[in-house]
Image: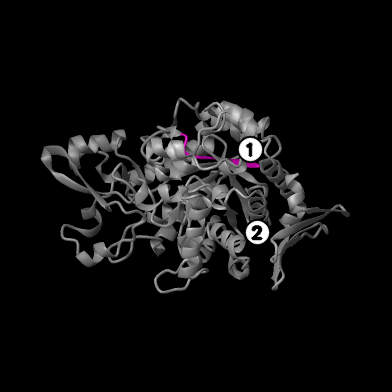
Amino acid sequence: MSLNNKVQLITYVDRLGSGNLEDMNKVLNNQLKDLFGGVHCLPFYYPIDGSDAGFDPIDHTKVDERLGDWGDVKALGSQFEVMADMIVNHMSAESPQFKDVLVNGKSSIYYPLFLTKEKVFGENPSKDDLAKIYRPRPTPCFSQFEVADGQIENFWTTFTSNQIDIDVKSDAGEAYLDDIMTKFSNANVSLIRLDAAGYAIKKPGSNCFMLEETFEFIQELADKAKAKGMKCLVEIHSHYETQVNIAKKVDLVYDFALPPLIMHLLFTKEAAPLAKWLEVSPRNCVTVLDTHDGIGIIDVGKYDGKPGLLDDTSIDNLVEKIHKNSQGESQKATGAAASNVDLYQVNCTYYDALGADDKAYLLSRAIQFFCPGIPQVYYMGLLGIQNDMALLEKTNVGRDINRSYLDKQMIESQLGKPVVKGLCQLIKLRNNSSAFEGQFNHSLDKQQLILSWSNVNKSQAQLCIDLNNLSAKLTFIENEASSSYQLEDLLL
């Protein structure tokens, strides 16, 4: 099975339209008709409103009944390629399995399902081993829970104390993940996004992140998915060389370096870092500018002594520009300013990160669509929604600044904005050109950056960016018919 090379949508089911799978399907077939080849439905399991917006499932095999059921997922999958999150690394502390462990301790049949410090490091772990563990968040790596008879257990909690890490190599862990995969297959899911898979394997003496054993584990999952007619997309934030190496071993990876590199180009008119990345970037990738998480920075930075695609000063300038463009709103949602944040991301809508500049935003999308990979567009970015400060103030969860609840009236209103109309036209141009099934090339000089595609059927597509004033021209040849557009004309 291969994914169609069309633009895909990323969205929460309950935040786009009336709040359930059936109505979201109607939105895709009406207001958003002919725009998307597929949809990444962010966690729709029970419950969708946990402490991490669905990424801490109590029951991963149950659709939250407020959204519908597996039949609704199957119906959606009959019309669109559906991507679903397989939360590989952890499950909720409120799950029946973990609650049984709290009551029965090591005698619980579910005790083998969860990881503890002692299971990995033994009774007397060395300080050096513990210090090597890579931390994606400022929260503790282990959380203490009192189990049967008052005994204290140190459960592994990579992300939050409500997300208990699974022992994925145990019989119980394998059975748990197999059950989820079977549910997906039966419900017409085409692509599995392996959430936090890089943290799933823990090993003493290592940093417990993207080990050789992790690659083996991911390959095992990919083989199981393939046997059921699905593919796997691996979600990893890391140094760009690591991402290139990962891509050689998996079906699909994200191009997380692209969002900050495009911003750097737009802020400085310097295209060399992007051009360098395009020399080596994976071709088996999914491209994004915005997602349900923040704007990643680690993907272009240095790591373990290896230089990044941007130097420290450029990254600092990039982050400060985002804060300035958003009038300080991103600062209120990032770092210690709000809870449940990652150490390597800036929380802000991509539109506001560019200063709500329609021309710059449309150019950022054009670059994304012309770079190698299958493009995904987040629902907030599709509709040009700005930072949701009211939701941020209500929840004090940094990423909620970019996770608004949009009803149909709001959707229809935003679809009338020039920048959204322009983006929708750009999506259709990308979808309708067979050139993107062919070969990619790029060139750079002091005056312009050119991204081009050509196919054996003689179809061609080209994006030419003038680096002096950031104007851009799009040219397409399809069935011997040629058409061209000045990018800013799409805003009219």
The residue carrying pointer 1 sits among few (fewer than 14), some (14 to 19) or many (20 or more) residues within 10 Å by Cα, namely many
Name the quadrant containing residue 8.
top right
Which element type, helix, strand or loop, lies under badge 2? loop
With respect to residue 55, does 318 lie above or below?
Answer: below
User: Mark 2, mark 1: which one is toward the viewer?
Assistant: 2
Where residue 390 appears, as percent x and y from the top left, is 45, 36
**Amino acid type of the residue tagged 2 in the rendering:** Cys
**Res 304 label:** none
**Front residue of 293 and 335:** 335
Residue furthest out toward the right: 480
Q: CA distance from mark 2 to mark 1?
A: 23 Å
Magenta range is 37-44
With respect to residue 105, does 217 lie above or below?
Answer: below
* Identity of the residue drawn at 72% across and 59% down: 471
**Rendered image coloring scheme:** one colour
Where residue 113 appears, as percent x and y from the top left, is 30, 44
**Front residue of 298 and 97:** 298
- What quarter of the picture does the C terminus occupy? top right
**Residue 75 in sight from this viewpoint:** no
Where residue 5 appears, as percent x and y from the top left, is 67, 50
N-term mark: 2 or 1: 1
**Amino acid type of the residue tagged 1 in the rendering:** Phe
**Res 80 label:** 1
**Disc 2 designates what residue?**
371
Query: Number of numbered discs present?
Result: 2
